[in-house]
Each structure stands twice: as C-alpha cells, then as structure tokens.
Image (spheres, rainbow, N blue to C red):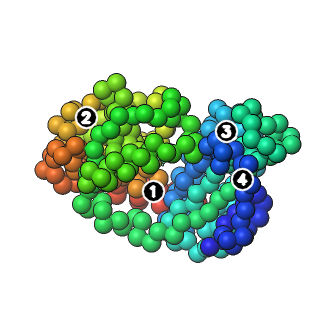
Amino acid sequence: RTVYVNGEYLPENEAKVSIFDRAFLMADGVYEVTSVLDGKLIDFDGHAVRLQRSLDELDMPSPCTMDELLEIHRELVKINEIEEGMVYLQVTRGAPDDRDFVFPDPETTPPTLVLFTQNKPGLADNPVAQKGIKVISIDDQRWGRRDIKTVQLLYPSMGKMMAKKAGADDAWLVEDGFVTEGTSNNAYFIKGNTIVTRGLSNDILHGITRAAVLRFAREAQMQVEERNFTIAEAQAADEAFITSASTFVMPVVEIDGAKIGAGVPGSNALRLREIYLDESRKAAI
Ligand code: PLP
C-alpha cells in the first residue's frame, strides 16, 4: 500500500513518524475517515469542513489547504486502486524536540499529516445491513469535547470490547440517563413516522453522515426530533439504527437484549440506507 506522510507518497513500510510526535505521546491529533465508493469520495466537503473546525478548536495549524487535501485523497485512491473503502487522515501537533505538556511553537514544530487508504470491497453491499446489529449500553466515560474528532479513542475501543464480550456488535453510550451516541457512530430510533436522535452539542460528534441522513429523512416527509432519549425509549421503538461514514445507515435490531420491533432491520432504516447510498454516490467527487 502507498501512504502519504508530510508531503511524500511512500510504501507503508518506509513511512516514518517521530516517537516525539504529540499524537503518539498525548493523543494530540485529529482525524477524519472518508468513504470511497466507485473510486470516488463520499461527503468530502463535510469531512474537510469538520477537520478545519477540529483544528481551530484545538489551536492546531492546518497542514495544507483543503484543495491540497482533496488532491492527496484522490491521488491515494488512484495509486492504491480503491473502488470501495476508506481514506484515513490524521493531523497532529507535530513532533517537538522533547516531551512537554505546553504546545510547541508551530513555527518550529509543523503539524504532522498522515493519510492512508483501506480497501473494503463490498462496503456498500454489506450483508450485515440485511441482518442488523446488536448493541449494549454502557456508561459514557469520555471527555467533554466529543464534538472534536480527536484520536483519543481508548474508551470507544474499550466499549467495543465490552460489546464483544457481551456477544453484541457495538455499544451505545449513556450519560445522565440519556444516550449520547455509539462508540464510533450516531444513534437513532424511529417511532411511527418520527426519527429521534440526540441534538448537536459538545456531547457528541457532529456526524457528517448524520447531517445528510436527517436531510434525506426530512425530504422523505419523515419527522425529525433532535432531543435527548433513553435506552428504554429506544427499546420500545419500531426501529433503531446508527450512522457513520464507514457503515452509512446500519439497522440496530437489539438493545441490551431487547428486540427492537420484530427484531429485524426496519423498513425505514433500510430505505434511508438506500437513499443515502444513492444520493451520496451521485454527489461523490
Ligand atoms: N460519533 C462518533 C463518536 C464517531 O467516532 C463517529 C465516526 O467516526 C461518528 C459519530 C459518525 O460520524 P461520521 O458520520 O462523520 O462518520
């Protein structure tokens, strides 16, 4: 695989980053994952805008312009012949001469920019979507700025392990009695013609897929309520699902052992998945 590091395209085994890089020592980095379908980038602009916001919120310099980022994405997709898969991008606060909590001067310590592709044939036709996934609920023990897409992913990783041990596929995070989101996705339920998902704040990541799916839902004459909800409310719903750049719209059929509706993927969730895939493919660049 050819990867990108700080201006260079290299074979992955030749790519190097300093051990003093602040992402390595302090998780001082942000990232984006953009899907590729038909060799084209899905929702690239949304991911680029959110990346800029993450950088701004952390006072991290931009490594390059968003046009240059688009070029790097396209080049990697081309070199690695990705038809379906993902592009992972990470920007860190760079590698100062020594370990220090204080941010280094960006003049002498430029950001580190790394991108690589992940080949995932069958990403859109994922058979899991026809079966749905099972989730458990766990306490949300992450920090208070989940709107910034940082590489601090230890708690979400622990959550996925808790789910795996419980025989489930993923976990929904609960804070003060209300669902925030999934470990790596936004969480929803549908009751009647109404989709419910938590509103935007610093408590959740502002999903790029979430924004698109809510727009498509409104266009399809569904009601959208952005508000807090409990696990019990979701368990009593007709349907449930998650969204993310890599899973698109994925039906949830069980929460903490309770079947949602008939315990099979809901028709609205599957329809939203189809609409999302169709529309985002048309708009892909
Ligand atoms: N919430 C969290 C915590 C995530 O990590 C992600 C994606 O990685 C999402 C939501 C979904 O965001 P997007 O649709 O932009 O991929």
Horizontal relation, residue 125 to residue 239: left or right: right
At label 2, the amino acid type is Ile
What residue sits right under mark 3 in the picture?
A: 55
Residue at image point 46% right, 30% down: 203
Indicate the amino acid at tag 3.
Leu
Task: Give the amino acid at mark 1.
Answer: Ser
The answer to whether the residue bearing label 1 lies less than 8 angstroms from the nearest atom of ligand 1 is yes
Residue type highlighted by circle 4: Ile
Residue 54: x percent and y percent? Answer: 62, 38
Query: How many other residues sit within 10 Å of disc 1, few (<14), some (14-19) or many (≥20)?
Result: some
* Of pointers 3 and 1, the one earlier in the residue sequence: 3
The residue to which callout 1 is attached is 246
Q: Position of residue 16 (x, y in %)?
A: 73, 62
Q: Is residue 227 left or right of residue 238?
A: right
Asked if residue 216 can be seen in this view, the reply is: no
Q: In which image quadrant can residue 176 be found?
A: top left
Which residue is disc 2 drawn over?
A: 231
3D distance between C-alphas at marks 3 and 4: 22 Å
Marks 1/2 in contact by CB < 8 Å: the verdict is: no
Is mark 3 in CB contact (under 8 Å) with mark 2?
Answer: no
**Residues at marks 4 and 1, CA–CA distance in whole angstroms:** 29 Å
Of badges 1 and 2, the one in the foreground is 2
